[in-house]
Image (spheres, helix red, strand yellow):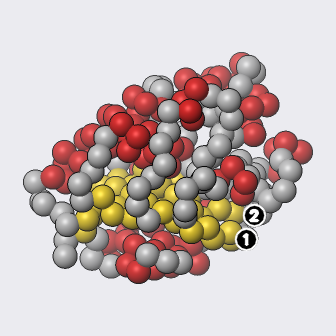
């Protein structure tokens, strides 16, 4: 069975943030699509349509039996938006690393600050819990695994959170309403995808559907 994995990096990052993880996924026989996209220069809906559309077009000629997604942070919201508006007949599993599935406490608190607008662009304004974008997202109709850290990599934001968090996203916000598997690890947000145990869990989920 030929299977592909579309990888989507987070806000303000590039494809290189997922390169080590990508190589590990490729070693298991998966074909990967991992490119950079202008995450701070356009809206979430624009990024989702453009990036995932191009990824599927690039992979379609190879007729994969399954197309999976592995995302970090914002990347998970791109997948949710795309699948709320499109169907993928050969959709496989979705693994989200630290997704702000109910918005970001940081965006809630700083969305009006000039430095936050400068750093995150139009995307940052859509990551508040009350953002209309979240009201458009439909339940995911496939196997979903979520990995979130419980150790802060951004201690200057710690006072914004209640309960466990990874410095940018809380465990509570990472969860989905629909059925999914959740794995909480002792790691921060920024380098979650570099953690060996996390990489092993991703491979396990892709191959077996469980962590």
Residue 124 in view (yes/no): no
Q: Secondary structure at mark 2?
A: loop
Give the total of numbered labels: 2
Residue 93 in view (yes/no): yes
Q: CA distance from mark 1 to mark 2?
A: 5 Å
Q: Is residue 163 left or right of residue 173?
A: right
List x then y, in percent, for residue 107.
70, 33
Q: Which residue is mark 1?
A: 186
Vertical order, 111 against 64 (above or below): above
Q: Residue at x 55, y 23 (%)?
A: 122
Observer-nearest of 82 and 166: 82
Vertical order, 190 against 111 (above or below): below
Determine the image quadrant of residue 142: bottom left
Q: Secondary structure at mark 1?
A: loop
Q: Is residue 93 left or right of residue 147?
A: left
Contact? badges 1 and 2 (CB < 8 Å): yes
Q: Which residue is mark 2?
A: 150
Question: In the image as oriented, which residue stretches furthest toward the right?
Answer: 159
Dot placed on the residue nearer the N-terminal end, 1 or 2: 2
Observer-nearest of 34 and 140: 140
- Position of the N terminus by quadrant: bottom left
**Mark identifier at residue 99:** none
List x then y, in percent, for residue 44.
47, 32
Determine the image quadrant of residue 143: bottom left
List x then y, in percent, for residue 168.
71, 48
List x then y, in percent, for residue 57.
19, 45
Q: Residue at x 55, y 62 (%)?
A: 179
Vertical order, 137 against 23 (above or below): above
Q: Residue at x 69, y 40 (%)?
A: 104
Q: Is residue 189 left or right of residue 65?
A: right
């Amino acid at each position: 069975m030929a299977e592909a994995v579309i990888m989507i990096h987070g806000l303000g990052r590039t494809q290189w943030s997922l390169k080590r993880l990508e190589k590990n996924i490729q070693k298991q026989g998966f074909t990967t699509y991992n490119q950079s996209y202008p995450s701070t220069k356009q809206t979430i809906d624009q990024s989702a349509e453009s990036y995932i559309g191009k990824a599927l077009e690039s992979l379609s000629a190879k007729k994969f039996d399954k197309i999976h997604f592995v995302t970090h942070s914002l990347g998970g919201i791109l997948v949710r938006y795309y699948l709320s508006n499109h169907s993928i007949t050969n959709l496989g599993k979705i693994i989200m690393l630290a997704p702000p599935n109910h918005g970001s406490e940081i965006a809630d608190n700083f969305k009006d600050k000039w430095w936050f607008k400068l750093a995150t662009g139009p995307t940052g304004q859509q990551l508040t819990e009350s953002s209309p974008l979240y009201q458009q997202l439909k339940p995911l109709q496939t196997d979903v695994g979520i990995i979130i850290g419980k150790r802060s990599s951004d201690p200057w934001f710690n006072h914004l959170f209640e309960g466990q968090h990874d410095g940018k996203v809380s465990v509570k916000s990472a969860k989905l309403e629909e059925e999914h598997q959740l794995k909480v690890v002792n790691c921060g947000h920024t380098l979650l995808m570099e953690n060996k145990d996390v990489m092993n869990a991703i491979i396990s989920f892709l191959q077996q559907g469980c962590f």
